[in-house]
Image (cartoon, helix red, strand yellow):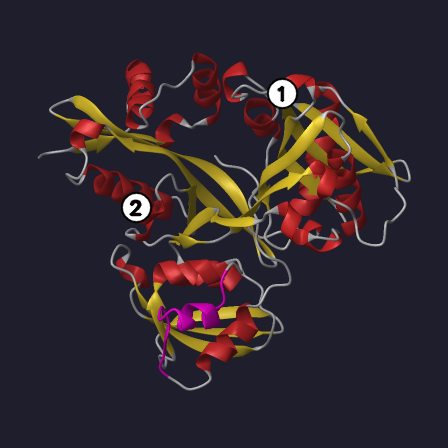
Amino acid sequence: MSVEIRVPTEQEIDRWFSVVGASFSDEVKEEDKEHDKRMLPPDRRLAAYEDSVMIGTAADIPLTLTIPGGELPASGLTMVGVLPSHRRRGVLTGLMRRHLDAARERGEPLSILWASEPPIYGRYGYGVATMRAWIAADRDRVAFRGSPEPAGHVRLVDLDEAERILPRLYERVRKGTPGMFARTPEWWREYRLPDPEHRRHGGGPRFIAVLELDGQPEAYAMYRVHEKWPEAFPASLLRAQETVATSPLASREIWRFLFGVDLVARIESAWLPIDHPLLLLVTDPRRLRPKLSDGLWLRILDLERALGARSYAAEGSIGLELRDSFVDDNDAVWTLEAGKDGAEVRRGGEAELRLDIGDLASTYLGALSFGRLAAAGLVEELVEGAVDRADALFRTRNAPWCPEVF
């Protein structure tokens, strides 16, 4: 099978969206097409062809990702798909090769994505970089520890006010949370704030609540209610799409508001960090029915730049023997030296730990420790004590979190 991979022409863009939809056994709605046309740079769209017939797609978005102690440019991979008639013939591998090579040529040290099927992307050197918590709580069974008095004031805002308030709150939290990416004004306008009917999935309109403490916005929640009235009793479902808070107090109070919405029997959210304070603030965490799932996946493309830009929790050095079958430059022994004035990364030195590049990606933002990976047999300790030293270096205060699929 001979496959050509190239940037599609503007005349092919409608076909490109058709292939995107068909790859997921769906269709891309016209409203979403218009948003994507404005947000996806044309030279970052890819298409795969067999005999001039388009059979696969991919695209990426230039993003700025928060990492421990700073931020780096990242290539946000999206819309990856191959028609069901052409799967398992190497088409996806060709698209991934082109994407990763192009990202490296542009000087983007990281590639990130949300995986529709996680087993696919481990083959290309990606690792789980953030986790997310799901909750599904009965509203009348949730109470806060110590019965604290309410604080602050919550009000609902319209889109114009949300566009002024939410980006500032999000950016305050984003700066200190590895895994979150910067949202441009265009991103808010095209992707985060619109509420098209086809994305409501039977629910009502989306509401935006803002919490003010001492007169200043400190948290917000986006949510919608799925109305239910069995036997004339109110039993609606509230789904929180995004909650962002600048402090534990603000987090408690915005969740107090959500748990207090009338006519609701159940509160659900699939977008919480795994160390969210809510899990400790309630009297019975079991009533939240927490579950874990993978979140953002990350691929390290430029090892020297990625490790060198990150901050570390201690001073010291570690030698990493990395296996990378897709980016030959990474497949080597690397020495990381973290000091008071930053980190230095160089090729060579003594190998103290042996692991795959995707598993290193899982430690990069702080999602997993080397100790957990070693306990699963995914890190080989070549020098005694190396796992503990690596964990001391890579430790982060908070769990990484990404609140949005792109």
Mark 1 is on which residue type? Pro
Q: Residue at 69%, 21% (x, y): give it.
A: 233
Mark pair 2, 1: CA separation: 42 Å
User: For numbered disc 1, what is the local secondary structure?
Assistant: helix
User: Mark 2 highlights which residue?
Assistant: 120
Q: Is residue 327 above or below residue 390?
A: above
Give the quadrant of residue 392. bottom right
Residue 370 part of the magenta-drawn span = yes
Label 1: how many Cα within 10 Å (few below 14, some 14–19, many 20+) = few
Give the quadrant of residue 255. top right
User: For numbered disc 2, what is the local secondary structure?
Assistant: helix
Q: Residue at 76%, 39% (x, y): give it.
A: 254
Q: Quadrant where the N terminus lies?
A: top left
Relative to 320, is 393 on the left or the right? right
User: Mark 1 highlights which residue?
Assistant: 230
The stretch in magenta equals: 368-382
Label 2: how many Cα within 10 Å (few below 14, some 14–19, many 20+) = few
